[in-house]
Image: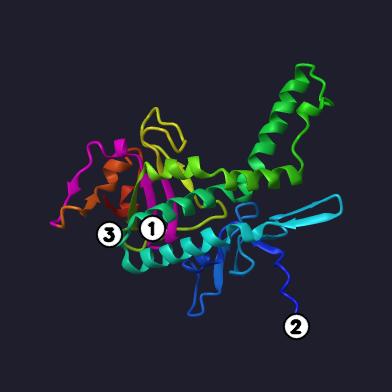
Amino acid sequence: MSKPPKPSRKHHYVTQAQLRHFARGVGRTQIHVFDKTTGKNFTSSILDASSENDFNTITEDGGRLNFEAMFDRVDDAGAAIVAQIVEHRSLSWMGEQQVLALADLGTVQMLRTKLARETPGVLVEEMRDLLDKLGADLNDPDLAPPTDADAKRSTIEAFVKRTSHRNSFLRLMPGLVEPAGSARFLISDHPVVFTNPFPYGDHALQAQGILVHLPMSPTLLLTWHCRRSLHGLTVSCPPRAKSMRRYVLTVGALFPENPSPSAMKKLSATI
């Protein structure tokens, strides 16, 4: 009897299925990478891009916990939905289960990245620097910075308790943005991006006017938008069934502070 395969040590914070929509060539196994730190660009395999060995493995007290498989179900459901969105270039085919799975995909992608994991530790270090200047005892255990294992346990906890984040996505309206002309969308190692066109707008899932973006492919961007951000938009509504209409929204009105609205052609949302 053959032994079961060992869990992979290469863990992705952006799924390979998502990256393949941005891949080059017929085989879709290679992707262009721009390193923001060094300013260099190069070609990488999908297997190696947006990944790190043992990123989702806790090593502590001589034991190892590989929790990469925790994401498999969400990843598989998300990959199937994204593939259909890219193929149909529409959300009109989606039912309740697909909308829920899409919200789960956005939630998990937001929580699983390296930036999401490292940011709390950075904030703690900044707070420690401030308290040190005020004369606080940094040896106090309550002020200790999180360890690598602490940060990974926080990822597990955030995944298990993600319902509130997913519900916040569900209150938003999903839509699709296409670029104009030769413009193309890019994907990053932290691909869920928040913007808010309101002058007083906060960048939080429950903020009024929030827009949450996730690139689907070089020619398609998924945007969840707060219903209040639709105020004043020019809407073209072609005849459809009463239960399903496809609204084409003027992007320039949605992004009034964008100096180059011509970079996008239209936003189409199924309501």
Which mark is in front, 2 or 1? 2
Give the CA separation, mark 1 to mark 3.
11 Å
Callout 3 environment at 10 Å: few (<14), some (14 to 19), or many (20+)?
some
SS for dot 1: helix
Q: Residue at x 52, y 67 (%)?
A: 17
Q: Tag 1: residue type?
A: Gln
Category of crowding for the residue at label 2, using alpha-carbon neighbours closer than 10 angstroms: few (below 14), some (14–19), many (at least 20): few
The amino acid beneath tag 3 is: Ser
* Viewer-nearest of discs 3 and 2: 2
Q: Which mark is residue 248?
A: none
Residue 149: tell me if it is visible.
yes
* Residue identified by numbered label 2: 1
Q: Is residue 172 above or below residue 24?
A: above
Magenta span contains residue 110? no
Residue at image position (29%, 62%) is 93
Please say whether residue 12 is visible from this viewpoint.
Answer: no
Is residue 153 depicted above or below 217 in this figure? above
The image quarter containing residue 151 is: top right
Residue to which mark 3 is pinned: 92
Image location of residue 180, percent across then percent down: 31, 58
Instruction: Tell me which label, 2 or 1, sits earlier in the chain.
Output: 2
Magenta stretch in the rendered image: 212-239
Local secondary structure at mark 3? loop
Name the residue furthest top.
134
Q: Are marks 1 and 3 in contact (CB under 8 Å)?
A: no
Would you name the residue on which mark 1 appears? 98
Task: Residue 167: give x, y in percent of width and height.
Answer: 43, 42
Classify residue 16 by image quadrant: bottom right
Cα gap from disc 2 to disc 1, whole angstroms: 39 Å
Residue type at numbered disc 2: Met
